[in-house]
Image (cartoon, rainbow, N blue to C red):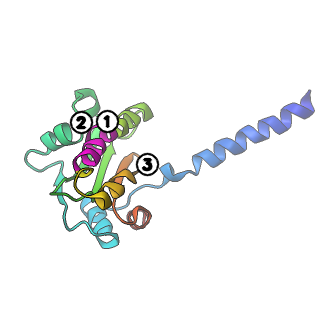
Amino acid sequence: MKKTFTPFFVLVILLFMFTGCSQSDTVLTGTLSESVDKACSAADFSSVSFTYMQDEYSEEVLMYMYGIEDQAIIDNIEDFVLSQRSGMYAATFAVIQFKSGTDIAVIDSVQTLINDVYVQSLINALMPYDPTQTDLAQNYEFKRFGNSLVLVICEDNAAVFDAISK
């Protein structure tokens, strides 16, 4: 019994170690403004206007464009920068930083809300007019960096994620 238990126990420990070294352990360095600058240097976000948490009407953008209306969720947000859809372009860069200790389920629910409200409405708006921009929107990516959730839609999502993680 001991011989089968020990390899199993070692395997479980290794799985926890590898899970602990995943992308979510990487954190964004610098301010959100610096993250925007890094993203803009890695991809073309010239058609995008950015709204920061401290900007006037920022909660409206958070609520109506991104679908985050629940006050309990909003209370868990420490800071954010969101791109606003401009014309018929899919380009998007958004970072939502959650307070330390925020439950993963809250972050997951925000990701689902953004997907259901922002991303799907973007795809639906672009679909009848521009297949190239529709394809970009359909290739959206979310990644977690510590307590931050990042959404990127552009020609090279990987380049943006790489730039903001340095």
Residue 113: which numbered mark, if any?
1
Amino acid type of disc 2? Gly
Mark nearer the viewer, 3 or 2: 2
Q: Tell whether position 75 is magenta.
A: no
Q: Distance of mark 1 from mark 2, alpha carbons?
A: 6 Å
**Image location of residue 12, percent across then percent down:** 72, 38
Q: Are marks 1 and 2 in contact (CB under 8 Å)?
A: yes
Mark nearer the viewer, 3 or 1: 1
The foreground one among 139 and 152 is: 139
Classify mark 2: helix, strand or loop.
loop
Q: Tell whether position 121 is magenta.
A: yes
Residue 67: which numbered mark, if any?
2
Of the numbered discs 3 and 2, the one sitting upstream in the chain is: 2
Question: Magenta residues?
Answer: 114-125
Rendered-image quadrant of the C terminus: bottom left
Rendered-image quadrant of the N terminus: top right
